[in-house]
Image (spheres, rainbow, N blue to C red):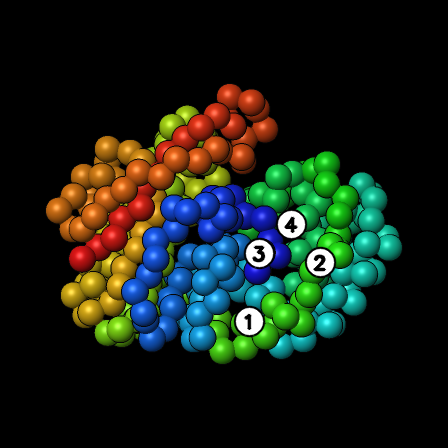
Amino acid sequence: MKPFLKWAGGKRWLTSSDLLPKFAPYAKYVEPFLGSGSVFFSTNPQKAILADSNDELVNCYQAIKHRPNLVRRYLVQHRRNHSDEYYYQLRDTQPASAFARAARFIYLNRTCWNGLYRVNRRGIFNVPRGTKNSILFADEDFALISERLADAEIVCADFEFTIGKAKRGDLVFADPPYTVLHNNNGFIKYNETIFSWDDQIRLRDCLVEAARRGVQVYLTNADHESVRNLYEGLGEISRLHRHAKISGKNIGRRPTTELLVHIQ
């Protein structure tokens, strides 16, 4: 199943390639940086803990899990009213209903510039209108997405809390924000204020501790010397090749690399 959101740093490219590792059998799938959930949807685990620190993102998943048809009905309204003027009008409002908030989130994600999620210092979404106009897709089934989420625990939480819930026999897949300038793709611009290098160190320590508890641990991160040094000697480090797509300039769309770390 394809993700229903476009997300900066999302792993749709990884799941559509032969680069995604073949995980050993596991009891529960744990993803502390959910984003678009590409790996979750592609692997379709029976049980999962899905988490993110972005409360609007988490609300969106929870709303689709519980009332997918209601979220879709709101999206139908947005499709009917869609225009540049309507985009900015909706962007500057905050619905009270969790389901209306979820539909607003999806609408903005699909019609803003490159599907980017960015807020200002007051926590207000401020991404300008993009070029896409598709609000709903013919092959999209929110009821099926809801079924996939039915046995997942979906929480808004710091990664340390989420990884701490992983037990022996579980699998953790961590795809954190990349906090170093990585192959000139500019991704740091969207994350440097919310995920520091100290957080990278704290994440490493959490993942190492999880591996010691008997958890399978996989991590994607920036292909940078500092990240390599952070995980050196802790397991298998592989280099993955892909094309960057978040930049609005051609120079930002050239081939780039990321790291896949299997902590053992």
Quote the CA–CA distance across marks 4 and 3.
12 Å
Quote the CA–CA distance across marks 2 and 4.
18 Å
Q: Which mark is residue 148?
A: 1
Closer mark to the observer between disc 4 and disc 3: 3
- Crowding around mark 1 (Cα neighbors within 10 Å: few <14, some 14 to 19, many 20+) is some
Closer mark to the observer between disc 1 and disc 2: 2
**232 relative position to 92: left or right:** left
Q: Which mark is residue 3?
A: 3
Q: Secondary structure at mark 4?
A: helix
Q: Position of residue 40 (x, y in %)?
A: 47, 62
What residue sits right under mark 2 in the picture?
A: 139
Quote the CA–CA distance across marks 2 and 3.
12 Å
Q: Position of residue 44 (x, y in %)?
A: 48, 67
Looking at this view, name the residue that lies furthest to the front.
18
**219 relative position to 152: left or right:** left
Residue 176 vs 76, above or below: the answer is above
What residue sits right under mark 4 in the picture?
A: 109
Quarter of the rendering containing residue 221: top left
- Crowding around mark 4 (Cα neighbors within 10 Å: few <14, some 14 to 19, many 20+) is many
Which amino acid lies under the numbered mark 3 shown in the image of this protein? Pro
Quote the CA–CA distance across marks 1 and 2.
16 Å
Looking at this view, name the residue that lies furthest to the left.
233
Q: Secondary structure at mark 3?
A: loop
Residue 190 vs 255, above or below: the answer is below
Quote the CA–CA distance across marks 1 and 3.
11 Å
Residue found at x 61% / y 44%: 115
Quote the CA–CA distance across marks 4 and 1.
21 Å
